[in-house]
């Protein structure tokens, strides 16, 4: 497996020989493709804990990316207990985080990108951004993504696609793409047929009236003497997972038939040496697409935040496709060096490189830019609200400790019996003993539809919500998955059988005191991030901040993670439930 994945001598991961400098990445071949994704607007270094629950159901059981902890280390041939184990797993997280420090940060990433570009030589590399770049921080929200457009321009991103980018207003999306100095590609976003006479963006250079595609579907780049085609694949379920009212003209979808047509067209008309898909499908969807669509050499994927040390090699009727996923929050840079000659990919080397801010010097120009765009908001961001007495994190299929802070805030501040919070996969980590700042709260909650609600729901409605999200998460067909994790709950316990049938995964629902939830009885429920219409309440970050200001130290007394059935022996779960 290691050989097939390109983990050959010279790679930090999976080789018997380690260079003294983990950022010594030997040049190989003639084309270098660097890939970042899902940074969620984190300009400065952060802490980010990997999940201890990432369940694979059905054929996905035991397959990447559904591996955690020691199972992941064994699968990829990584040694336990060291820096690699810390980078890719949750194991011994608080202690290892104290030892190795923060990860990510655009200034440190910029230093590595500049170093790799210089080592590969002019014209021999591309920097690809898989999206979820303009959202996830207070400054991105306040500047409507402009701070991140400026940062990616300084970083030198050549090509990007999107997802959370589309949660700004359509006019703002178009304006940001105009300001972006690279190219925005998405073959699966069309203009609605019934909107054509009202369409406001006919002068946008990416719009094609004949195909009705809203954005440029692909681009051609000459890299290292090879002709490289990069096709964009935006998040397919944007108007379902996020408010469609912000982007009323556009339709999305997996569109694998059109992808096959696009690949065929590009190969026939452009005669590229290499065909790459820059995707925001999520890794499971990418794996299925790689089986369905032939003629793609590499898929650089995002959305599900899976930090995979090596690509998965997928066989299809046209040959093989490499499928990668490069983590999140600016924590990793994927580096794929390829030998491309005679119109084909001959060989490659791949490394998913952790960005440790203690081990990479900050690029001075990028850091100056970051300081400048943050300066107007510095006082608000740095407000200290409380102190964490345990690791506060989000990532995982079920409630994380920071998620519990959010749902506890909703039940307490809004005087509710039950609270619901989306299973977003973005959100940074706070270590024990650290102050919880307003910036930390915004990192967990900062979206363009943050309004909260408080209303009565019947027990049957609450169960329906849980079942719907569970089917989205655990459906055996990846094309029915939308990414994200299980809705987080407060004041509510239940039993979940992830491999159960649709509508039968959630049972034994009770309030915190053990009182059974009755289907016909009404309960006061508080939540946020409604997709269909705007809720009437205050932004979630104000609710959470009010709650934290009343706490001295924050330690979760009860984690409303469900009891699980049928997951014994699944390598996508470990150390569950989390200790209180």
Image: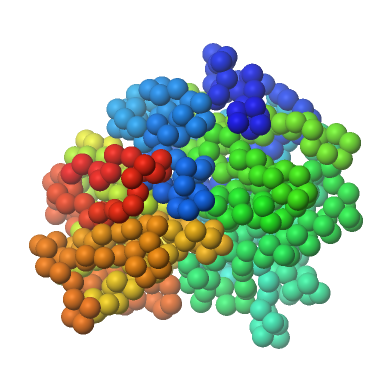
Q: Residue at x 21, y 82 (%)?
A: 520
**Placement of the C terminus among the 4 image quadrants:** top left
Q: Position of residue 141 (x, y in %)?
A: 45, 59
- The answer to which of 535 and 201 lies nearer the viewer is 535
**Placement of the N terminus among the 4 image quadrants:** top right
Look at the picture and state if 483 lies above or below 36: below
In the picture provided, is 73 more to the left or to the right than 156?
left
- The answer to which of 82 and 97 lies nearer the viewer is 82
In the picture provided, is 331 more to the left or to the right than 35?
left
Q: Position of residue 128 (x, y in %)?
A: 65, 45
Q: Position of residue 261 (x, y in %)?
A: 78, 62
Q: Residue at x 52, y 42 (%)?
A: 64
- The answer to which of 20 and 313 lies nearer the viewer is 313
Residue 357 appears in the figure:
no
- The answer to which of 133 and 339 lies nearer the viewer is 339
Asked which colour scheme the image uses, the reply is rainbow
Q: Residue at x 79, y 43 (%)?
A: 274
Rendering quarter of residue 211 = bottom right
Q: Residue at x 69, y 45 (%)?
A: 315
Residue 250 appears in the figure:
yes
Q: Position of residue 107 (x, y in %)?
A: 52, 35
Look at the picture and state if 81 lies above or below 341: above
In the picture provided, is 222 more to the left or to the right than 512?
right
Rendering quarter of residue 204 = bottom right
Look at the picture and state if 578 lies above or below 527: above
Count the marks: how many?
0
């Amino acid at each position: 497996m290691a050989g097939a994945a390109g983990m050959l001598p010279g790679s930090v991961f999976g080789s018997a020989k380690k260079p003294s400098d983990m950022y010594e990445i030997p040049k190989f071949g003639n084309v270098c493709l660097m890939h970042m994704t899902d940074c969620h607007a984190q300009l400065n270094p952060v802490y980010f804990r990997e999940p201890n629950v990432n369940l694979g159901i059905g054929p996905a059981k035991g397959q990447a990316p559904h591996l955690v902890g020691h199972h992941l280390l064994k699968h990829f041939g990584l040694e336990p207990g060291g820096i690699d184990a810390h980078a890719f797993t949750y194991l011994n997280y608080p202690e290892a985080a104290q030892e190795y420090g923060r990860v990510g940060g655009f200034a440190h990433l910029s230093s590595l990108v500049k170093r790799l570009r210089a080592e590969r030589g002019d014209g021999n590399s591309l920097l690809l951004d898989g999206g979820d770049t303009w959202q996830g921080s207070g400054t991105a929200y306040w500047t409507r993504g402009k701070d991140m457009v400026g940062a990616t321009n300084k970083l030198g991103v050549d090509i990007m696609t999107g997802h959370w980018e589309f949660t700004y207003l359509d006019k703002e999306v178009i304006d940001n793409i105009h300001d972006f100095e690279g190219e925005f590609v998405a073959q699966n976003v069309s203009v609605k047929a019934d909107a054509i006479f009202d369409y406001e963006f006919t002068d946008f250079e990416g719009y094609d009236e004949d195909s009705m595609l809203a954005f440029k579907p692909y681009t051609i780049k000459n890299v290292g003497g090879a002709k490289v085609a990069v096709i964009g694949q935006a998040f397919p379920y944007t108007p379902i997972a996020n408010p469609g009212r912000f982007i009323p003209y556009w339709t999305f979808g997996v569109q694998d038939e059109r992808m096959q047509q696009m690949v065929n067209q590009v190969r026939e008309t452009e005669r590229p040496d290499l065909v790459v898909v820059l995707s925001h499908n999520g890794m499971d969807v990418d794996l299925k697409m790689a089986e369905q669509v032939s003629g793609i050499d590499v898929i650089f994927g995002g959305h599900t935040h899976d930090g995979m040390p090596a690509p998965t090699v997928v066989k299809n009727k046209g040959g093989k496709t490499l499928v990668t996923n490069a983590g999140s929050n600016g924590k990793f840079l994927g580096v794929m060096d390829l030998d491309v000659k005679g119109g084909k990919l001959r060989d490659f080397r791949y490394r998913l490189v952790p960005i440790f801010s203690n081990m990479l010097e900050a690029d001075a120009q990028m850091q100056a830019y970051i300081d400048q765009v943050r300066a107007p908001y510095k006082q608000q961001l740095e407000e200290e609200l409380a102190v964490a007495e345990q690791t506060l994190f989000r990532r995982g299929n079920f409630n994380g400790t920071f998620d519990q802070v959010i749902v506890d805030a909703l039940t307490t501040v809004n005087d509710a019996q039950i609270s619901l919070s989306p299973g977003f996969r973005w959100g940074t980590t706070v270590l024990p003993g650290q102050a919880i700042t307003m910036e930390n709260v915004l990192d967990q909650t900062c979206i363009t539809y943050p309004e909260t609600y408080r209303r009565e729901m019947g027990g049957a409605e609450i169960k329906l919500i849980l079942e719907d999200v569970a089917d989205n998460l655990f459906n055996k067909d990846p094309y029915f998955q939308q990414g994200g994790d299980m809705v987080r709950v407060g004041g509510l316990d239940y039993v979940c059988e992830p491999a159960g049938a649709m509508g039968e995964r959630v049972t034994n629902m009770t309030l915190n005191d053990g009182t059974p939830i009755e289907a016909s009885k009404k309960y006061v429920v508080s939540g946020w991030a409604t997709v269909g219409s705007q809720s009437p309440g205050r932004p979630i970050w104000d609710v959470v901040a009010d709650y934290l200001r009343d706490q001295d130290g924050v330690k979760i007394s009860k984690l409303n993670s469900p009891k699980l059935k049928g997951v014994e022996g699944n390598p996508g779960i470990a150390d569950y439930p989390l200790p209180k």
